[in-house]
Image (tube, helix red, strand yellow):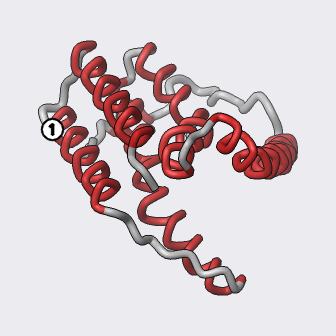
Amino acid sequence: MFRTHRDVFVPQGDNPEKPATSKGQAIAALIISTVLIAFLSETLVDQIAPVTKALGLTELFVGVIVVALIGNSAENSTAILMARRNHMDLAMTIATGASTQIALFVAPVLVLLSLALGHPMTLLFNGFEIAGIFLSVLIVAMISSDGETHWFEGAQLLAVYAIMAVAFYFVPE
């Protein structure tokens, strides 16, 4: 992961591959996608409280399990697609990179923005949440440390996620 083979990235032949879309089309697609995602995110946030109350779920469960699954669905589907194409390095990088980005960038920025907007948000976790984070990091490190993986390790990760989901479901707020 930390080294590469430069010859893999050297273009083959005299005619380099042309992109399918222009720069302007790509920027327009990004802007339209961003606006649509912002609209859908607002809709999701508006509906969380009524759905949480109607289904009798805790805010902790909805935030840790449901919103996390919905919010990371693009990364999750891309990681699965890359794994199916046997690009496991890329699949692991996508899966772990999304979590790292949230922990090291998004959460601190949200805390700082909340102060500026007058609605202070803290990153205050209870013991159960800290244990969940610690165990998640530990398990991912153990599985990815040997540089190879197989279906059974994937099944174990899914089982750990299911166990944590059940535990968060029953944790009182």
Q: Position of residue 141 (x, y in %)?
A: 20, 42
Looking at the rendered structure, the kind of residue marked 1 is: Met
User: Looking at the image, which residue is at 30% across and 54% down?
Assistant: 128
User: Looking at the image, which residue is at 34% across and 55% down?
Assistant: 129
In this rendering, would 22 be left or right of 18? right
Badge 1 element? helix
- Within the image, what quadrant is residue 67 found in? top right
The residue carrying pointer 1 sits among few (fewer than 14), some (14 to 19) or many (20 or more) residues within 10 Å by Cα, namely few
Q: Position of residue 131 (x, y in %)?
A: 25, 53
- Within the image, what quadrant is residue 130 found in? bottom left
For the residue pair 159 and 81, the one nearer the viewer reads as 159
Q: Which residue is mark 1?
A: 142
User: How many marks do you count on the picture?
Assistant: 1
Instruction: Classify the position of the N terminus by image quarter.
Output: top left
Q: Position of residue 84 (x, y in %)?
A: 44, 14
In this rendering, would 131 be left or right of 79? left
The answer to whether residue 62 is above or below residue 120 is above
In this rendering, would 59 be left or right of 155? right
